Image (tube, grey):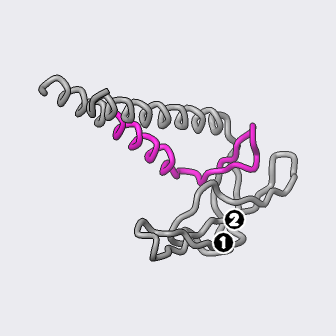
């Protein structure tokens, strides 16, 4: 197997994983329920940087909201960031999953879909470059 074939397979794998994760995300929030949530705290943790010597402080937001049946949910967001997105006490409009009510996303936040779309584009670019380079070698 030559380098172009390996690059093609890696690109295909990246594209397929991105596509499957995007489909899962769309299905999970397809019939989501809109409600208000309140930022209650942030969980702080250290993440090693690429050089493994420096550390980056990461934050995961926790919110609380009421389900349609009145049950109070307090949960963390699915991903962290290197800054606090909203001050504690901020009221947010969120959409939570009917299937898994502890999973939510802030209304209008399409960052996860954008990241998965970028992942798919990166995979396609790898496929195209490997195909072009393989045909012209």
Query: Element under label 1?
Result: strand
In contact (CB < 8 Å): disc 1 and disc 2? yes
Q: Where does the image place residue 20, in percent across and percent down from the top left?
A: 54, 32
Span of residues in magenta: 95-123
Q: Is residue 20 left or right of residue 114?
A: right
Give the image quarter of residue 85.
Answer: bottom right
Q: Earlier in the sequence, mark 1 or mark 2?
A: 1
Q: Eyeballing the image, is 85 above or below 128?
A: below
Q: Where does the image place residue 110, in percent across and percent down from the top left?
A: 49, 48
**Which residue is tagged 2?**
62
Q: Where does the image place residue 74, in percent across and percent down from the top left?
A: 78, 60
Instruction: State the residue in front, 48 or 36.
Output: 48
Q: Eyeballing the image, is 71 above or below 52?
A: above
Q: Which residue is drawn at the image coordinates 57% and 62% (left, top)? A: 80
Instruction: State the residue in front, 7 or 46.
Output: 7
Quadrant of image for the C terminus: top left
Instruction: State the residue in front, 40 or 19.
Output: 19
| Count of numbered labels shown in the rendering | 2
Query: Residue 84: which numbered mark, if any?
Result: none
Looking at this view, name the residue that lies furthest to the top: 135
Query: Element under label 2?
Result: strand
Quadrant of image for the N terminus: top left
**Which residue is tagged 1?**
42
Say few, some or many: other residues with alpha carbon within 10 Å of mark 1 (under 14 / 14 to 19 / 20 or more). many
Q: Which residue is drawn at the image coordinates 39% and 43% (left, top)? A: 118
Q: Which residue is drawn at the image coordinates 57% and 35% (left, top)? A: 26
Q: Is residue 51 left or right of residue 94?
A: left
Give me the C-alpha separation between circle 1 and circle 2. Answer: 6 Å
Q: Is residue 103 magenta?
A: yes
């Amino acid at each position: 197997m030559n380098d172009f074939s390996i690059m093609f397979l890696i690109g295909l794998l990246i594209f397929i994983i991105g596509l499957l994760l995007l489909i899962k995300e769309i299905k999970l929030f397809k019939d989501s329920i809109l409600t208000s949530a309140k930022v209650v705290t942030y969980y702080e943790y250290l993440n090693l940087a690429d050089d493994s010597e420096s550390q980056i402080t990461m934050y995961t937001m926790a919110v609380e909201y009421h389900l349609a049946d009145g049950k109070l949910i307090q949960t963390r967001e699915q991903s962290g960031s290197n800054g606090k997105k909203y001050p504690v006490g901020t009221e947010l409009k969120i959409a939570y999953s009917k299937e898994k009510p502890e999973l939510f996303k802030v209304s209008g936040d399409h960052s996860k879909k954008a990241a998965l779309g970028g992942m798919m584009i990166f995979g396609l670019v790898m496929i195209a470059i490997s195909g072009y380079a393989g045909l012209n070698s």
